[in-house]
């Protein structure tokens, strides 16, 4: 996919009308795109009244609007269920901080990068177990880590050698924080911005943040489309590029704490090949 991405985007820029392979027309006709999200501020968020916000949905909403699709309709999903749901046709696109990795790049058609972040730990004040990396958790037989099911943090912990029975799948940030406060886990891991948002809102002096996690890479996400919907993805990329060039992209994501420069400094091709 990545090898031909530049050429595909170049063709789309030259004649965006040719990008409509039927899927975009379908979305225009129904008036909305169905997006899969997590509820993980600042990447994604759902207010009490059901309004969907967060940096990823806000970018997607603006891009789709420019493509003639009036709005997005979101459904909350665990990270591990997002790609199967997309492939099964339950979603039109994933806009959820789903970081690019080779296996994901092989399974979906990513847009160009949108949000970039590193990894962080939330722990008890003073970091009593001295956990600064996933390897530190693996090396301590008493340490348990909480992480989103199917998410980057779960995989990094397992790859570092943390046994499966010490990697606790957590459904959402509030549950992870409560498990940490109750002593059921020793560390809860999410991207830096997500952990900072969670801990800031909790206002618990007994919790602290270690960021970035030592030895963990920086990741970027993109909007993820079904294989076969590359023309829709290319049309999305055309408008995303215009957003970036105009400065509107920075205005959308930087109030959430993300760096537009970080997303604009790399490409889908590099990210899918490097990680």
Image: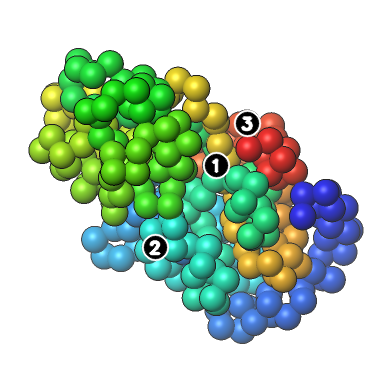
Q: Quadrant of residue 226?
A: bottom right
Dot label at residue 261: 3
The percent position of residue 239, horizontal first and vertical second, equals: 70, 56
Q: Is residue 70 above or below residue 61?
A: below
- The mark nearer the N terminus, 1 or 3, is 1
Residue closer to the observer: 245 or 96: 96
Determine the secondary structure under disc 3: helix
The Cα atoms of the two marked residues, 1 and 3, are separated by: 10 Å
Q: Nearer the viewer, mark 1 or mark 3?
A: 1
Circle 2 residues within 10 Å: few <14, some 14–19, many ≥20:
some
Task: State the residue at coordinates (64%, 71%).
Answer: 68
Q: CA distance from mark 2 to mark 3?
A: 29 Å
In the displayed structure, 172 sits above or below 146; it is: below
Q: Position of residue 118 (x, y in %)?
A: 48, 31
Judging by the rendered image, the residue that carries numbered circle 2 is 77
Viewer-nearest of labels 2 and 3?
Answer: 2
Which residue is label 1 attached to?
115
First in sequence: mark 1 or mark 2? 2
- Is 146 situated left or right of 243 in this image? left
């Amino acid at each position: 996919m990545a090898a031909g991405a530049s050429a595909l985007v170049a063709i789309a820029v030259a004649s965006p009308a040719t990008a409509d392979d039927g899927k975009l027309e379908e979305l225009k006709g129904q008036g909305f795109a169905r997006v899969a999200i997590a509820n993980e501020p600042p990447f994604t968020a759902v207010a009490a009244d059901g309004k969907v916000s967060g940096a990823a949905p806000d970018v997607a909403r603006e891009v789709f609007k420019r493509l003639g699709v009036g709005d997005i309709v979101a459904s909350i999903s665990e990270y591990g269920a997002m790609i199967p749901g997309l492939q099964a046709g339950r979603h039109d696109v994933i806009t959820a901080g789903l970081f690019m990795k080779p296996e994901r790049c092989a399974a979906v058609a990513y847009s160009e990068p949108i949000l970039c972040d590193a990894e962080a730990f939330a722990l008890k004040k003073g970091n009593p177990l001295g956990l600064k990396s996933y390897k530190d958790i693996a090396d301590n037989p008493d340490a348990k880590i909480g992480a989103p099911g199917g998410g980057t943090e779960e995989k990094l912990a397992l790859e570092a050698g943390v046994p499966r029975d010490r990697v606790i799948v957590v459904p959402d940030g509030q549950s992870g924080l409560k498990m940490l406060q109750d002593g059921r886990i020793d560390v809860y891991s999410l991207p830096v911005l997500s952990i900072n948002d969670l801990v800031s809102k909790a206002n618990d002096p007994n919790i602290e943040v270690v960021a970035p996690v030592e030895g963990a890479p920086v990741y970027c996400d993109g909007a993820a489309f079904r294989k076969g919907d590359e023309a829709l993805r290319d049309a999305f990329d055309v408008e995303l590029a215009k957003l970036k060039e105009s400065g509107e992209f920075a205005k959308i994501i930087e109030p959430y704490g993300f760096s537009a420069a970080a997303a604009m400094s790399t490409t889908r091709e590099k990210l899918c090949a490097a990680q």
